[in-house]
Image (spheres, rainbow, N blue to C red):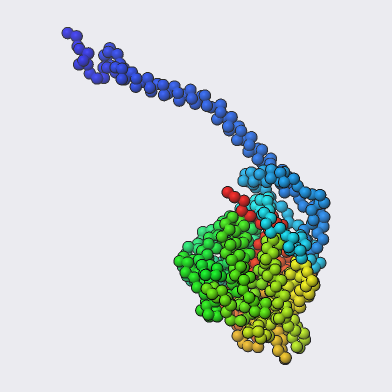
Amino acid sequence: MPVSDDILPRYQRLPGGNGSRPFRCRETHLFFAIGATILIICFGTIFFMPDLSESLRRMESLSRVQKQVRDTAEGFLLPPPPHAEPDAVGAAPPRHAGQIEDPHLAQDRQKLYEKVRSAGGLPPPPLAKPRQGAAAADAPADAGDADNVDVDEPLPAAAAAAVPGAGTNKRALPEGEDSDPVMRQRRDTIKQMMQHAWKGYATYAWGSNELRPVSKRGHSAGIFGNRPMGATIVDAMDTLYIMGMDAEFEEGRRWIADHLDVSKMDSEVSIFEMNIRYVGGLLSCYALTGDTMFRDKALAIAHAMLPGFNTPTGIPYSLVVPTTGRAKNYGWASGASSILSEFGTLHMEFSYLSDVTGEPEYRKKVERIRQVLNGLEKPNGLYPNYLNPKTGKWGQRHVSTGALGDSFYEYLLKEWLRSGRRDTEALTMFRHAIGNITERMLKKSKVSGLTYLAEVQYERPNHKMDHLACFIGGLYALAGVTDKNKDSARYMEIGAEITNTCHESYDRTATKLGPENFRFSDAIEAKAMKLQEKYYILRPEVIESYFVLWRLTGDPKYREWGWEAAQAIERYCRAEAGYSGIQNVDSTSPRQDDVQQSYFLAETLKYLYLLFSDNSLLPLDQWVLNTEAHPLPIRGVNPYYRPHVGD
């Protein structure tokens, strides 16, 4: 009896079974879909394979073209400067006559530049090497004709803004080695001092704000808060870079990238100190290397300082807690006033920060400070050291070019220079301020006619100068060279005379190091009279003026004076693990205070190194040094300026 198909085992209805019944319709469709899918995959792969191969060939071709462009584009995008010799110290050679570029070609070249830079970069253009000597630092335009400067001129093209090779951290500055073997030996000595100072810090205080070089442990001043925020690392970075200490620079960079975190600053810090040391130091490293990590860290710190500006006048407080935004002033500062040298020493860094980030808020904050100051009546044309941020009224009538006042005047002239002479408001304010200082505070000693700047308290002179005030010898000279007017020659002379007085304050001590304060009377001059005035804490201001006067005049005495100071520091301040301040400059066996200030690495050693270097290293027509000696590029003339050009 035949077996019915309906009772056949299921397996016999499938291929390979013993049954002869054909597939059901549903199963037939399933197998058809599977087969079609396989065919599509196979034939689709074959169909698209030629395009894939072609894409690979095109990518290889594009890579070869990009390499050829990178190899050849330097001369096209950044043509070498003219071979004409500069006509003054620090002055870049003029452009060839008739060398005016078609703006459309410039735009096309700019677009190509950006493509090449994003593909791998170009080597940086060389900076012009100025002659040593003659008394002229920089004058790309008529310095005395400030009103003719186009203040609305846009930022320079990105070819000058983003230096090729950005982000590599490779040294791009001239070595700056002097042709004189004696100067080379002295410069090597200063570098060895820097190596000793850095090694002691790295060994015994790494990550701390400062070093105690005698007791070999970390130290922190109250201005940095209660957290170890690596102030010495940040302050020293551009000095390490300038000196070619590449391993140490990379070591510091790693710490900054991994550990410098403003969100951990949970105690009061000084807005002024955070600006000049941290923001200024990081922006300087960004300018020198193009490494955006430095710029971004500077931006984060400046942003954390902004709550300090939340006052009725816009004049910032002195202290802020970054994590909470709580801000206040020092209780001792004339009824909790803000301090002139602190709120007046923000403009360069904040304005440059706006330029390199494209965020205008920072420039607006410091412009508001200017508006308030310009609207106030100045007693006898002078700026008192204290201003109430709530009422906008002056505090105690104390005027000084030293502590509490000093760098406000410095930043008026230097911001005009840093802006490429566009900020004519800064120049106008400087001319007004320095004119009244010269008329009302400039004095001659009765003993031998030394020139100095007295302080003024309630319109009466106090015949005392701070070591801090000795920077102004260089400032007068810089004004005399860069701002050409009827007072230029006189300012140059005053600068040299004040620098000589500050040298006398060094030369008349037992250690050949200058005191914190020195006085003038009928019987004495340039001498500290009180024990609490006789300390030296590794300050740079006298050496700073030596450096500026050397660059502007070429007079070798400034190098000799600087070498005397370097030898004295080595003799009396060197400790086993670094360098320390001393408590009495009039003692031949002074006791060390056991603090290596971060600014010793940022300023004192940097100025000494530059003093014994060729003028091609950080030429004064290309760079402005902030009050912590962190170099900022001059807008419009320095290819390291790196303004923001959009995402």
Q: Is residue 448 left or right of residue 467?
A: right
- Residue in front for this viewpoint, 610 or 200: 610
Q: Look at 60% across and 62% down and name the residue there.
A: 363
Q: Look at 68% across and 63% down and name the residue there.
A: 423
647 up-or-down from 495: above or below = above
Count of marks overlaid on the render: 0
Q: Residue furthest top?
A: 1
Q: Is residue 220 left or right of residue 356?
A: left
Residue 442, image x and y in percent? 72, 81
- Residue in front for this viewpoint, 638 or 611: 638
Q: Residue furthest left?
A: 1
Residue 392, image x and y in percent? 56, 74
- Residue in front for this viewpoint, 500 or 349: 349
472 up-or-down from 11: above or below = below
Question: Which of the 4 image quarters holds residue 298?
Answer: bottom right
Q: Is residue 280 left or right of residue 488?
A: left
* Quadrant of the drawing holding the N terminus: top left
360 up-or-down from 626: above or below = above
Would you say residue 533 is visible in this rendering? yes
Residue 143, image x and y in percent? 76, 64
Q: Look at 58% across and 81% down and name the residue there.
A: 396
Residue 336, image x and y in percent? 52, 78
Q: Residue furthest bottom?
A: 523
Would you say residue 578 is visible in this rendering? no
Q: Look at 51% across and 67% down and name the residue there.
A: 310
